[in-house]
Amino acid sequence: MNLKKFISDYSAGLVWAGVSIFLATVLHFLGLFDLLNYKVLDFSFTQIRGPLAGRGPVVGPHQSPPISTDSLDVVLVDVDDESWRLIPYKWPYPRDDVWARVVRNLADAGARVIAFDIEFDSPDFKSDFVEKLNQEGANIQLRHADEVLADAIRYAQSKGTRIVLASKKVNEPTRFPPEYISYPMPRIMAADPEPGLINEIKDFDGTTRKYAVAYDMAHEPDRLYLPLGLKALKEYKGVPDSVQLRPSWGTNEIHYGPYSISTYGKRATYMVNFYGPASGVGLPGEEPWKTFDRYPLSNVLDDAEFDLDPIEEDSDWMDLFDPNSDINVMMQMFDPEYKVPESPFQDKIILIGVSVNVLLDVKTTPFYNYAGTQQLMPGVEYHANAVQTVLDGNYIQVAGGTLELTWQSLGANLLIIIILALITFLLVQRTSPIIGGLFMIIEMLAFVDVALGYFTQDFLWLPKLVGAQVLPRSLVASISGVLTIGAPGIGGSLVVPIIPGMASIVLTYGSIVLYRFLMERRDKQFLKHTFGTYVSPELIDQMYETKQMPELGGESGIRTAYFTDIASFSAFSEILTASKLVELLNEYLTAMTDVLLAQQGTLDKYEGDAIVAFFGAPIYLDDHSYRGCLVALQMQEELGKLREKWASEGDKWPELVHHMRMRIGINTGDLVTGNMGSRTRMNYTMMGDVVNTAARLEASAKQYGIYIQTTMPTLVLAGEDKFEWRFIDKVKVMGKTEAVEAVEIMAIKGELPAEQQKMKTIYDQGIEAYQRQEWDVGIEKFKASEALEETFPKRPTTPSKVYIERCEYFKDNPPGPDWDGSWTLTAK
């Protein structure tokens, strides 16, 4: 392919592909794809990858979670519905009787870190009330609950259990400075627990997907505050207070002690790799899902010294893990080989929070829609997923760094957009819109399969997912191993933003198809400009579809030439003013042209009152002869309607107009059609001997008093059995040496009036006698047919009358035995 042809064939498509790339990039920059990108990420969690850890029924074509719940480092303790019912205190629970006991019991159970997702930043109600009574003179000896909780914290720390308490970054616009940290009460902080912020990062759609590495405040930009999860991680690994966060933005990482946190772009946040849905999600009637080991707060309180309500449900559950508890001592007495059950809290990070609905500490996460239910995740489980992500180093990588378009992510996103645009260009440039559309759909499905396959590291997830949905259940069960979507390894999830790429595909396809559509319209307009005045719209469309564009030159072929003329038109010119004559002609020519174009005839030109046309070009018509004969009859019918109209308009038109007649000549044969003229000005016309004969047939029809004359070969091609016709003459027209058999088209087959049918029968008998040179018999028959010939004003003669005179002539001047039946016309 030479350069010129390449540019001609592909330049426009490449330009529109470039425009599509620019538009997709701009739309991405404006944030129009961000929401869909995030929703696709949510879809990847729930429908493609599924849970990474947990216990419960597997939903969809996902494999069983590759990570055991027991191997996770985080355990949840929460105020759930069961705790809400069994703990004999109202919310907020007292810090001395409930929370201090929780801290001591978990420390005794071997917890390494206890982190509270519950704030203690307001006074304990009971202790505050007692203090007020003592100030008024009462002498109630009750230790302050905050001090009791502080002592429990000190006790836990003495056993090697680290405590992290919830704090919060607050913004009060009327305060100065407006930002501050709300810490637990001073008496509690006196025990030196670690404070950790519990603020939440929400995306603009209200979904929680990210976790902060650190927070700062506007008036203290150099001081960083760690969130609850990072503080729990700090205490879990014993990171000294002197260790600072060390960002490494070249690799999108923040280093903190033994942790290298893969950040979301160049921001102090990271994507939480949620290990599963909120614990408790499940289909009706099935075991609920359990991502993390999760225990009711009532269980942690339930020891020999704490009674649940009702007492029938008090089992002293925590004593099961205490070697010195009465039940374990007794079991060892009866069974020396008895082993104390291992504590589920041993060396774990314990996150304490609430899940009961009335306290409303819940988040919308990517697993909001899972297993056919919609369920919010308790805030404490959000922190648990964030902590486990860092502990495992199980970070979600994003191609380019962020789903939003930034200078950092521009390169990766632009590469995706450009590659997909070019592939689309190559697929649709040389194909029809429908085939191109199919290619586009296949390309989009392939891209989605590969792009989302990077998230789960299974690049056949799409056919597997579709197969699991559409195949019979029995077949799915038998090949479940084949249809199971794999899960990624630790740190193996890569998010590829697919919406910009999809937009690039759609925009490229749409722009190229739209451009081709506009070019087609332009080409059609060119055809209409060139042919519109003499070709029907259907023919123009067909010309375009077959790519038959007008070019200078002609094409030879069998076509039908067609001529019409108004009888005695010079008389009209004499009695009508110029303006009235133009008005009359315009109405007449419009009606006749409409009939012509309706049968896909081609208008060559108007010559005064004459219409010159042809059938079978520029688009070939198999039935061009038939259409020519049919149009002749339809034009005569349409002229009859015009005569009635003109007569009904009173004195507007003279009587001559009321009796207007037109003659038509039709001839089929080999003629040349094409654009003839100069390269700057051309006319689509016809040339050839066939054309001259058609013109002579129209003119000579006057000598027989008929109004549609054609040749026998034309009639044969049109179909003799489709029309009522009669033989006119074997005639040599002016300027021709060879005789042609001329016939008159009288009507559509079966539509000739009975009287005219009778006339035709007698006339045909006269023609037979004429051809046998039986002149007296011919005269008799022709006189009989003449009596039945149609008469109307201005009809110059009839074929019967012509043959009466002809027979009388030959009777006196016999043509001889070698006569071929022809007659030579001496006038046009």
Image (tube, rainbow, N blue to C red):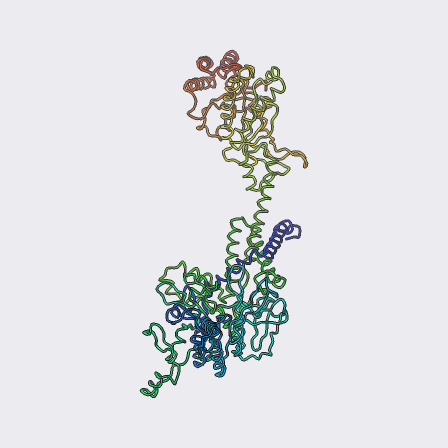
Q: Where on the picture, by quarter, is residue 564?
A: top right
Of 490 and 467, the residue lying toward us: 490
- Residue 26 vertical position relative to residue 530 in the rendered view, above or below: below
- In the rendering, at what x and y percent does residue 55 appear? 40, 70
Judge from the rendering whether residue 756 lies leftward or rightward of residue 649; answer left or right.
left
At a point 43% along the width and 24% down the height, the residue shown is 751
Total labels: the figure holds: 0
Of 295 and 698, the residue lying toward us: 295
At a point 52% along the width and 51% down the height, the residue shown is 437
- Residue 175 vertical position relative to residue 13 in the rendered view, above or below: below
- Residue 384 vertical position relative to residue 728 in the rendered view, above or below: below
- In the rendering, at what x and y percent does residue 589 appear? 57, 25
- In the rendering, at what x and y percent does residue 399 appear? 57, 64
Query: Visible in this render: residue 819?
Result: no
- In the rendering, at what x and y percent does residue 21 appear? 61, 55
Q: Where on the picture, by quarter, is residue 571?
A: top right
Of 542 and 789, the residue lying toward us: 542
Of 407 and 171, the residue lying toward us: 171
Judge from the rendering whether residue 563 lies leftward or rightward of residue 463; answer left or right.
right
Query: Visible in this render: residue 500?
Result: yes
Quarter of the picture holding the C terminus: top right
Furthest-front residue in this view: 137
